[in-house]
Amino acid sequence: MALHPVVESVTARIIARSRPSRGAYLAHLEAARMTGVQRGALACTNLAHGFAAFPANDKLVLREYKKPSVAIVSSYNDMLSAHQPFERFPQIIKDAVRKVGAVAQFAGGVPAMCDGVTQGQPGMELSLFSRDAIAMATAIGLSHNMFDAAVYLGVCDKIVPGLLIGALHFGHLPAVFVPAGPMTSGLSNQEKAKVRQLYAQGKATREELLEGESQSYHGAGTCTFYGTANSNQMLMEVMGLHLPGAAFITPNTPLRDALTAAAAQRAAVITEQGEYLPVGRVVDEKCIVNAVVGLLSTGGSTNHTLHLVAIAKAAGIVIDWDDFNELSAVVPLLARIYPNGDADVNHFHAAGGTGFLIRELLDAGLLHEDVTTILGKGLRAHCAEAFLDGEGGVTWKDAPLASADENVLRTAAAPFSPDGGMVLVAGNLGRAVMKVSAVKPQHRTVEAPALVFDSQEQFMAAYKAGQLDRDFVAVLRFQGPRANGMPELHALTPALANLQDAGRRVALVTDGRMSGASGKVPAAIHVSPEVLAGGPLGLVRDGDIIRVDAFSGTLEALVPADVWCARSQARADMSPNHVGMGRELFAMFRSTVSAAEEGATTFGLPSPIPTTVALHDAAAVGDSLPGSDEDLLIKKPI
């Protein structure tokens, strides 16, 4: 199948736009590459420190400078269900790579916070910035320069993007991503949503709400709805950074363990000593376009209109919301997973999963097949499903030709919708993203008076006081990354859904986030520029008529131009949002963060390097410099 002309043109535009920064990035990658193992760049005292506590046989391998060392970077903690399974993974990985003659070392841990726990809490204001903190923690772990490849253990919202951003800053190293998998299905998403709405109406007790939530989130693994966490896992497969079929295998099962072992061994194979597939080459412009298409075709998380921009930037690639918008117009919706439907990701996997999805998109000309993945092949090799081979290993079979449940997963010839359900809206209020795949057509256009709020708490106080039983557009401002870290605003979802169900015409416009669980209420989110950066959302006043129209892509305050121009920006005291719960430590993030459409990053695009002196050339001089007595006792070759 020929590539769709819009996919082709968007890709060409991205390649042209990115040429200077991508060229600089690849130059950095080549400067960091070296022949032989990376630890060969270390002075002997450096290396001795790097394997001092290791078992004798592993230490011998590391001393010989012949076999690769694989870094393990993990987001393990045992409080969060998605990350708890990673406790067992390091030993599986170490045992697996020994079988192929390599060594694995636990390079470092990264923080992992859960938006489900911090939702509506002060800690949520650290959430988005935790992505870049995770990237920084990844860089610290890899900076020891002991490693020839890395396996990254991560699942949830900011963790996988953060790990990938960190990995791309070490783009000369191959990278394999290893998920933990989703928890088994519990209380249905439909029932969970119903309990939440009843509680918001005061018709369910807190005990009933907690029981419903506990039945939904009940065991090890990711939440089973299709939010940012599970969008991450789908993206890692479409980008070729997972082994095929790895995303949605539940934790603590033989197949999950076998896939983890196989991923570790693959990481050892694709080093400089083998097939050499550095992650900075795997993640190229075509790979990024494939990721956007995969996101749109599944109704994935709106958070990735930030994260994919940031991931691309880390690889020297420049994308924007126009790219998302143009692709969304031609990419059909092939999956219905909550909140876009009733099914969860376990149902999606059982219906055919990512292998089926990738094949359908390839056959429709909507994905680039000619990309390099961790398999060293084109994307067609990922149209597969994983099974145990009878000896504890993994084998792959072609993805099924037909969906096992067309209420969950469909072919490109008979999609749920002809478009991806994510649109760009723009006007005198700025540029924003709307996810409409779960919004019924009759609710996709709202024209109503504005009610302006400066916090979620103000909105909820008005709702509980019965002041919102009317048609309105809630304008929630001062929620951008500069203001308070751009928290998710899901505390508003049940209340807005109740008002919509009661027949009111309601919508939300905000410079904050609604994330992967954006639901049935129309919401123009990530409004850019944000109010604290002078964005026009700060000019809106109560009673202004606001038009939000997903069909025409309109985001307008219907205010006479002379009145609009005469207004001054609203101001708010944000100091309470900058103290407590560790928020003081993130002041540097708030002061340097880029706009939402630029990925809300605290780092910039790669810049050219003045010379192409490889990093190992500078490091290797350590053995010829005066040092401690310890330096004098250890001399190469070891």
Image (spheres, rainbow, N blue to C red):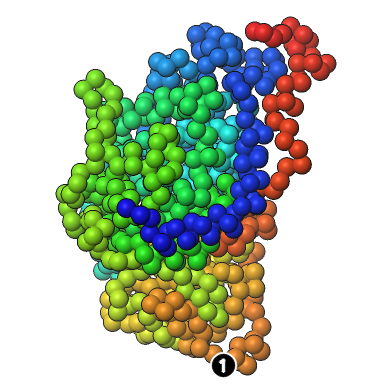
In this orientation, which residue lies closer to the viewer: 115 or 637?
Answer: 637
Residue shown at the point (76%, 20%) measured from the top left: 622
Q: Secondary structure at mark 1?
A: loop
Q: Position of residue 326 (x, y in %)?
A: 44, 66
Relative to 497, is 332 above or below? above
| Residue found at the very far front of the displayed protein | 2
The answer to which image quadrant residue 494 occupies is: bottom left
- 345 sits to left or right of 593: left
Mark 1 crowdedness (10 Å alpha carbons): few <14, some 14-19, many ≥20: few
The answer to which image quadrant residue 99 occupies is: top left
Relative to 627, is 275 above or below? below
Q: Position of residue 222 (x, y in %)?
A: 35, 44
- 568 sits to left or right of 73: right
In this orientation, which residue lies closer to the viewer: 480 or 173?
Answer: 173
Q: Is residue 390 visible?
A: yes
Q: Is residue 178 visible?
A: no
Residue shown at the point (83%, 16%) measured from the top left: 626
Residue occupied by mark 1? 560
| Residue found at the very far right of the displayed protein | 626
Residue shown at the point (28%, 39%) measured from the top left: 384
Q: Position of residue 154 (x, y in %)?
A: 44, 39
Relative to 416, is 522 above or below? below
Question: Which residue type carries mark 1?
Answer: Pro
Q: Position of residue 590 (x, y in %)?
A: 64, 58
The answer to which image quadrant residue 377 occupies is: top left
Relative to 575, is 349 above or below? above
In this orientation, which residue lies closer to the viewer: 369 or 96?
Answer: 369
State which quarter of the image contains the C terminus.
Answer: top right
Residue shown at the point (35%, 82%) measured from the top left: 505
